[in-house]
Amino acid sequence: MKPISRLFACLAALAVPFTPALAADFPDKPVTIIVTFPPGGGTDLLARLLGTELQKTWKQSVVVENRAGASGNIGAQAVARSPADGYTLLMVNSSFAVNPGVFRKLPFDPKADFAPVINVAYVPSVFLVPPDSPYQNLKDMVAAAKSGRHVTFASCGNGTPQHLAGEMLAADSQVKLQHVPYRGCGPALVDLLGGQVSSAIVTASSAMQYITSGKARALGVTSKARSPFLPAVPSVAEQGHPGYELDQWHGLLAPANTPKAVIDKINADVATIVQSKEIKDRMTQLLYVVVNDSPDTFKKIVWDDIDRFSQLTNKMGLKLD
């Protein structure tokens, strides 16, 4: 054997693939879950619930870190640039798939720079108004806008599904609704309750306590049909907007090139957690429809939504930069 051939043979022998056996040792140090929104919103609540349970399963610290800003792009960029070893994960919702359509330039490639790990839940968003609002339903709000009244809607941030939900209603109704973006659903709710905005669109999970306490009134849910958790609240579709639908998924992404064995382990461990009766019941109380999609299934969901939302925002002319 020639010297150069022997060199390559030795290097090949030294190369140890990342096998499932090695993945069984994952994690052997703390794991960070980056959330792209401030504390208090539905995505943050879900990340903290999963983090607490993963910490028990892995016997390692799981830190939830909020990196809000730029519609989630700051946190996503941080994870995209992290080592591809599974120790830094990104907790996202459907806004991750909206951003490529509304930002001309992103500091990362949403498909090439990430590896979907697991989708754990769906949740609709809900249109809210203060209890003393004159709007009893979405038709009232749309009619007010058509009459020339200044109608505002708060959202969980530029480029979020809630932002898109409001723009979809405005486009379908052919009215102007003034968007007021916040850095998360929590801050949007604070200003709604304080009377700073006419309405707000937030996740049902973050709004539920205010709806049940009477501090806010729900006008409509963005899911295709009524939510089983809010059966008295009509969908947007049934209020004169057939075809309107915008459910929000929540899941974990890892940096691209994270070993498949690590992704599969995280997927399996999280799936076990969300399928347990205790955690499933707690998630249901937060209005989540619990799922445990495989990495391949979640990848198709995310990639398809990136394409779907890009087509929709281009049609609407919705750009944020």
Image (cartoon, rainbow, N blue to C red):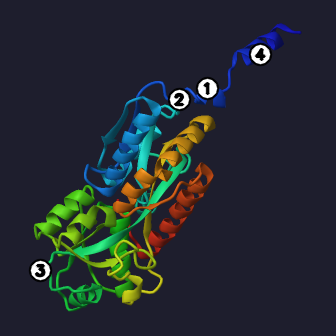
What amino acid type is highlighted by mark number 2? Phe
Give the Cα separation between the discs numbered 2 and 1.
Answer: 7 Å
Which of the pair 85/148 is nearer the observer? Answer: 85
So how many labels did they put on this image? 4
Which quarter of the rendered picture does the C terminus lie within? bottom left
Query: Can the viewer see residue 77 in this picture?
Result: yes
Q: Nearer the viewer, residue 273 or 137?
A: 273
Q: Position of residue 189 (x, y in %)?
A: 20, 64
Against 209, residue 81 (above or below) is above
The picture places residue 71, in percent across and down from the top left corner, at: 33, 55
> Which residue in the structure is indicated by mark 1?
22
Which residue, given by chain and number where applicable, does mark 4 sit on? 8
Q: Which residue is mark 2?
A: 26
Residue type, mark 1 in image? Leu
Residue most extreme to the right: 1
Left or right, 265 with respect to 188, comes to right
Q: Nearer the viewer, mark 3 or mark 4?
A: 3
Q: Residue at x 53, y 57 (%)?
A: 302
Disc 1 from disc 3: Cα separation = 59 Å
* Residue type (three-letter) at the residue carrying disc 3: Asp
Tell me which label, 2 or 3, sits earlier in the chain: 2
Describe the element under mark 2 as helix, strand or loop. Answer: loop
Who's the residue at 69% across and 19% down the image? 15
Between the residue at mark 3 and the residue at mark 4, the CA separation in whole angstroms equals 76 Å
